[in-house]
C-alpha cells in the first residue's frame, strides 16, 4: 500500500530553519518525481519544490535560495530543508508522488505537517 | 508564477452538473496539455481527479470530466453527489519544470 508520512513541522521563529521529512512506503522515491506543496491558513495550494528521479531539483520563486529539496534512497525519504523562514512560510506542507502516466500530476499525497513561523 | 483564476464557489443540487473554470495564460494553461485537477476535503490529503487536461485515473468516477480551450481549463461534475462537496484545485505545468495551482473553488451540494 502506498503511503506518505510527513514530519518535522513545528513552531519556529522568523529567520530560523527547519527540515521536513516525507517517508514513503509501497514504492521507491528514487523511481518517481516527488514534490512539496503547501497551504497557508485560509489560502489555496501553492507548489513549492520538485525532485525528479534523475535528481534534478526545481523551486517556486517564493522559496528559491532558501529551501532545498533532497532525498535519501536508502531511507526512502524526501526532505525539504527550509532556511531563513518568514511568517509567510506558515502553512501545512504536503509531499506528493508523481503520477507515472503523466508528465506532471500527483497521485498520492500525504496528510501534511504544520509549520508555523512566528515573527 | 501567478495563481490560476478559479471561481471562489459553485453550487448545485444533487443530480445536477457544475463546471469549474481555471483561467491562466499562454505560459501555463494555454501552453501545455498538463492540467490536473485535485479534490481536497478539509483535513484530508488532496486527491487527483483529472490529469493531462481530460484523463481520469483509475477509480475516479466518470462523472468527473476535464477539458481545455485556449487559456481556460474546466472541470465538470455531472450527476452531483453529496460526497462531491469539497474544494477543487486546478494545476498547470508552467514551463522550466515549474507548475502553478489555481485559487481553488468550493463546491457546495445544496
Image (cartoon, coloured by chain):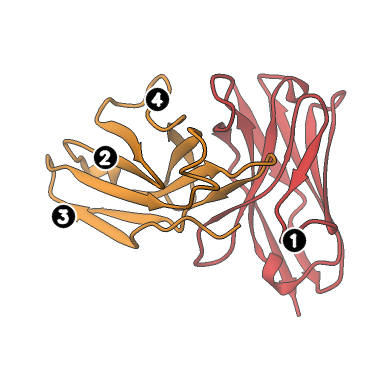
Q: Nearer the viewer, mark 1 or mark 3?
A: 3
The circle drawn on residue B55 is 4
> To which residue does mark 2 refer?
B76
User: What percent of the width, then of the height, locates residue A77?
Assistant: 79, 32
Residue at (75, 30) in percent of width and height: A52
Q: CA distance from mark 4 to mark 3?
A: 28 Å
CB contact under 8 Å: marks 1 and 3: no
Q: Which of the pair B93/A75 is nearer the observer?
A: B93
Q: Secondary structure at mark 4?
A: loop
User: What percent of the width, then of the height, locates residue B20?
Assistant: 30, 49
Neighbourhood count class around disc 4 (C-alpha, 10 Å): few under 14, some 14–19, many 20 upward? some
Q: Secondary structure at mark 2?
A: strand
Instruction: Name the chain under label 3.
Output: B
> To which residue does mark 1 refer?
A10
CB contact under 8 Å: marks 4 and 2: no
User: What percent of the width, then of the height, locates residue A81?
Assistant: 84, 51
CB contact under 8 Å: marks 4 and 3: no
Q: Which chain is orange?
A: B
Q: CA distance from mark 4 to mark 2?
A: 13 Å
> To which residue does mark 3 refer?
B110
Amino acid at each position: 500500500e502506498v503511503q506518505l508520512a510527513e514530519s518535522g513541522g513545528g513552531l519556529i521563529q522568523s529567520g530560523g530553519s527547519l527540515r521536513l521529512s516525507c517517508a514513503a512506503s509501497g514504492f521507491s522515491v528514487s523511481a518517481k518525481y516527488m514534490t512539496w506543496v503547501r497551504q497557508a491558513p485560509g489560502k489555496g495550494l501553492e507548489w513549492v519544490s520538485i525532485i525528479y528521479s534523475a535528481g534534478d531539483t526545481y523551486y517556486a520563486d517564493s522559496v528559491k535560495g532558501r529551501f532545498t529539496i533532497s532525498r535519501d534512497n536508502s531511507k526512502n525519504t524526501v526532505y525539504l530543508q527550509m532556511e531563513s523562514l518568514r511568517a509567510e512560510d506558515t502553512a501545512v506542507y504536503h509531499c506528493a508522488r508523481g503520477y507515472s502516466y503523466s508528465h506532471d500530476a500527483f497521485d498520492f499525497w500525504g496528510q501534511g505537517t504544520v509549520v508555523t513561523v512566528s515573527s | 508564477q501567478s495563481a490560476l483564476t478559479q471561481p471562489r464557489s459553485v453550487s448545485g443540487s444533487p443530480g445536477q452538473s457544475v463546471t469549474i473554470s481555471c483561467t491562466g495564460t499562454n505560459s501555463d494553461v494555454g501552453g501545455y496539455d498538463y492540467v490536473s485537477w485535485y479534490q481536497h476535503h478539509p483535513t484530508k490529503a488532496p486527491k487527483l481527479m483529472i490529469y493531462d487536461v481530460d484523463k481520469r485515473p483509475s477509480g475516479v468516477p466518470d462523472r468527473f470530466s476535464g477539458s481545455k480551450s485556449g487559456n481556460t481549463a474546466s472541470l465538470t461534475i455531472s450527476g452531483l453527489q453529496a460526497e462531491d462537496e469539497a474544494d477543487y484545485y486546478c494545476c498547470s505545468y508552467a514551463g522550466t519544470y515549474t507548475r502553478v495551482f489555481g485559487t481553488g473553488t468550493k463546491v457546495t451540494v445544496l
